[in-house]
């Protein structure tokens, strides 16, 4: 919710100092999104707050339930829509995959969100509320949060960082910073800024190709931030943070899944021990690309392993409800795109 506005209303009314903490805790710790239920406040204050402040900004349009995944379509106050996904395959900790923008300006060729174009950035409340919603639904605040839904988080840097601070606040939601991951298509100024924040969150770079020409074809952002510059900043990042840096590599049939590509990738990673490759099987969307076969993926993975590259094959969940990587998309009239 709008924390500054809340503070001002309480101050103008001459409410005691503890009132703010009371309300803040009710929303972010107890997950109460309705002031009328905060019975420790006076009736008058509850009515004023209900009129002035929106403690939860998302309207639930649809909930689709898959085998191990839920996908929710939320309507924002201006009528735009976003999708958020809850992954339940890891029963120790569920993972919420959240959106940071309505649409995305980067237009990666394999991604359904990219096809929507860019509509607007989400504000920090709209980002936070996606997490609060699932925490309340699942009665579980120990979640992993990944910025891998719709949008490029590092192009909405301030709101994303503000949302992370709110989620991480010990006096509120208290989500461990280590449970938060940001995935970027390679926005170099954002990566540089992030490495100076001294935050223990996880960073992943969506790589998808080991050479400039091919990467520009499938990820136009490579024209602006080349692979060469990106790998230089990736090295700087691990040196500065001493943290593992993940690279996502979506395998596309006949494009980036052959022996030559694996050799180029090995060379690109330059034996940096803190680099880790996550191989992802492509989920068919209505693009020209197809998933690589399991046999090809295994072969690609073995080649990396043989060369001492840290590599994990990530399984995709939620294909049956178009909730898997690269499949999120909404229309302007707020429907899921099938
Ligand atoms: S993959 Fe990510 S960065 Fe690329 S278009 Fe899709 S949402 Fe945007």
Image (cartoon, grey):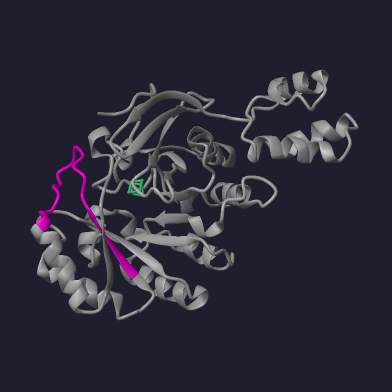
> Does 298 sit left or right of 64 as displayed?
left
Label the magenta part by its dominant secondary structure.
loop
Q: Residue at x 33, y 46 (%)?
A: 89
Q: Nearer the viewer, residue 73 or 190?
A: 73
Specify start and end residues of the magenta stretch as a single range: 276-294
Q: Which residue is farthest front?
A: 92
Q: Nearer the viewer, residue 248 or 106?
A: 248
Q: Position of residue 166 (x, y in %)?
A: 63, 47
Q: Position of residue 57 (x, y in %)?
A: 57, 29
Q: Position of residue 126 (x, y in %)?
A: 54, 36
Q: Nearer the viewer, residue 226 or 86?
A: 86
> Is 283 in the magenta?
yes
Q: Residue at x 32, y 27 (%)?
A: 336
**Considering only vertical position in the picture, is 8 above or below 232?**
above
**Considering only vertical position in the picture, is 231 above or below 182?**
below
Q: Nearer the viewer, residue 239 or 211?
A: 239
Image quarter where the C terminus lies is: top left
Image quarter where the N terminus lies is: top right
Q: Residue at x 54, y 49 (%)?
A: 160
Q: Residue at x 70, y 40 (%)?
A: 25
> What is the number of callouts on the image?
0
> Does 188 sit left or right of 55 as displayed?
left
Q: Position of residue 113 (x, y in %)?
A: 33, 40
> Is 280 in the magenta?
yes
């Amino acid at each position: 919710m709008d924390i500054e506005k809340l503070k001002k209303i309480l101050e103008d009314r001459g409410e005691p100092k503890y009132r703010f903490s009371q309300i803040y805790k009710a929303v972010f710790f107890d997950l109460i999104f309705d002031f009328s239920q905060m019975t420790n406040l006076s009736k008058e204050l509850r009515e004023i707050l209900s009129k002035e402040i929106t403690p939860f900004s998302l309207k639930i349009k649809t909930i689709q339930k898959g085998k191990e995944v839920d996908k929710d379509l939320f309507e924002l106050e201006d009528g735009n829509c976003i999708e958020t996904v809850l992954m339940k395959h890891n029963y120790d900790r569920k993972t919420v995959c959240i959106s940071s923008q309505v649409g995305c300006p980067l237009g990666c060729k394999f991604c359904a969100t990219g096809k929507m174009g860019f509509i607007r950035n989400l504000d920090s409340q709209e980002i936070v509320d996606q997490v609060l919603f699932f925490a309340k639904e699942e009665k579980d605040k120990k979640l992993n949060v990944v910025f891998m839904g719709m949008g490029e988080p590092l192009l909405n840097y301030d709101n994303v960082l503000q949302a992370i601070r709110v989620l991480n606040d010990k006096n509120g939601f208290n989500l461990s910073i280590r449970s938060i991951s940001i995935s970027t298509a390679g926005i170099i100024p954002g990566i540089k800024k992030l490495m100076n924040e001294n935050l223990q969150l996880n960073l992943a770079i969506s790589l998808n190709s080991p050479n400039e020409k091919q990467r520009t074809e499938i990820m136009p952002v490579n024209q602006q931030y080349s692979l060469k510059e990106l790998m230089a900043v990736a090295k700087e990042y691990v040196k500065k943070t001493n943290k593992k840096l993940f690279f996502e590599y979506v395998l596309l049939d006949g494009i980036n899944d052959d022996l030559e590509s694996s050799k180029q990738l090995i060379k690109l990673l330059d034996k940096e021990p803190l680099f880790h490759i996550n191989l992802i099987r492509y989920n068919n969307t209505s693009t020209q690309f197809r998933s690589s076969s399991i046999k090809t993926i295994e072969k690609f993975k073995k080649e990396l392993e043989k060369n001492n590259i840290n590599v994990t094959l990530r399984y995709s969940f939620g294909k049956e409800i178009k909730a898997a990587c690269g499949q999120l998309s909404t229309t302007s009239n707020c429907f899921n795109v099938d």
